[in-house]
Amino acid sequence: MKKIAIWALPLAATFALTGCSGLLGSDNKESVQPSQASTPETSASESTEAPPLSDTTPAAETTTDSGFSTDAGPNHSASADQLSADELTEVAGAIESYNGQSAIKIVGDVENKALAAQSEKQLASSEVIPAVCAVYSAAAGSDMNSHLNIITATFAGDSNDAGMSVSLGSYDDPADVQTMIGKAKTSSENCSSFTMTVLSQTVTATVEDLPATTNAETTIGTVADLKSGEQYAKNLIVSGYDGVNTVSVSISEPKDLDVARAKAEEYVDQGLIHIAGY
């Protein structure tokens, strides 16, 4: 079975620090809160002081040990199809209206990039075995994010899960999306299982491919199981890549994977429909 781990690394870092897999921007009072001893001074939840990353700041082209270039360099081309952060926020609002459910929180582009920068720092200071798994995560870092507008809406859970986040992204070059797809697929070879140690907290993760179907040009589904001591967490993620746009749905603690997958597929398609209106 094909297994993809690239998106599980940030989840594992969050789980190591907080004791739960956590949904970005969630205000769910039932979530397990991090203890003082396991929370770094600059954790993702305190990242408001982190400097925002500019969408227009050019980044030097670098290549990781995985062989992936982290920036398109001089061949990079801006696309007129890229949606702005404001337009993505409107798409998130349209999803809210369509489902008659207000998001717990909508995290904007600047905050998302500040959170990503903090996560990148946490991953850089962690020990990952096998080490190549950390390399794949680094290849999807801030250089790529500098070409991306992204909005994340977090919704309360239902009878089948503990909560859901919908991330709406739009790159300025279709090649960036293909690069991300390539990274996700290539990471499957060596990263179906890994361990991560952050601040003396060790997380063991296993990641399996989840067959998923959406209206996107490319769909990737995964299920990550995380364990740290006596604590466990499960996250299901379905991502749709279409042109310069991406819609990724993460569902926390799904009881029935088939039900959760169908829900994730539905929200990916909703995002694509509303994005197509721009």
Image (cartoon, rainbow, N blue to C red):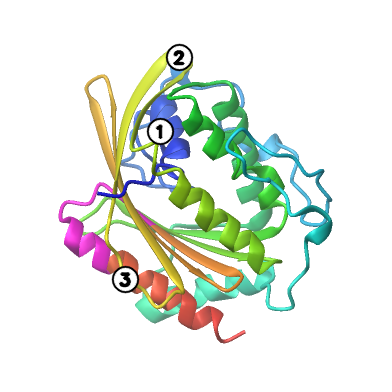
Q: What x and y, as percent, mark residue 198? A: 47, 20
Query: Looking at the image, which residue is at 36% across and 76% down?
Result: 99
Mark 2 lies on residue: 37
Q: Is residue 228 left or right of residue 34?
A: left
- Asked if the residue under mark 2 is in contact with the one under mark 3, i.e. CB atoms within 8 Å, the reply is no
The kind of residue tagged 3 is Thr
Mark 3 lies on residue: 213
Element at label 2: helix
Q: What x and y, as percent, mark residue 224? A: 31, 42
Report, in whole angstroms, how far the alpha carbon at label 3 lies from the one at label 1: 26 Å
| Depicted 245 relative to depicted 184: above or below | below
Q: Is residue 256 magenta?
A: yes
Report whether residue 25 is seen: no
Query: Looking at the image, which residue is at 78% across and 67% down?
Result: 77
| Region rendered in magenta | 250-262
View extreme (left): residue: 256
Q: What x and y, as percent, mark residue 70? A: 68, 45
Q: What x and y, as percent, mark residue 25? A: 49, 48
Q: For residue 155, what is the image quadrant?
A: bottom left
Q: Is residue 242 magenta?
A: no
The kind of residue tagged 1 is Ala
Mark 3 or mark 2, earlier in chain: 2
Report, in whole angstroms, how far the alpha carbon at label 1 lies from the one at label 2: 18 Å
Q: Which mark is drawn over residue 12?
A: 1
Q: Is residue 173 left or right of residue 76?
A: left
Mark 3 or mark 1, earlier in chain: 1
The kind of residue tagged 2 is Ala
Mark 2 residue crowding within 10 angstroms, few (<14) / some (14–19) / many (20+): few
Is label 3 or label 2 in front? Answer: 3
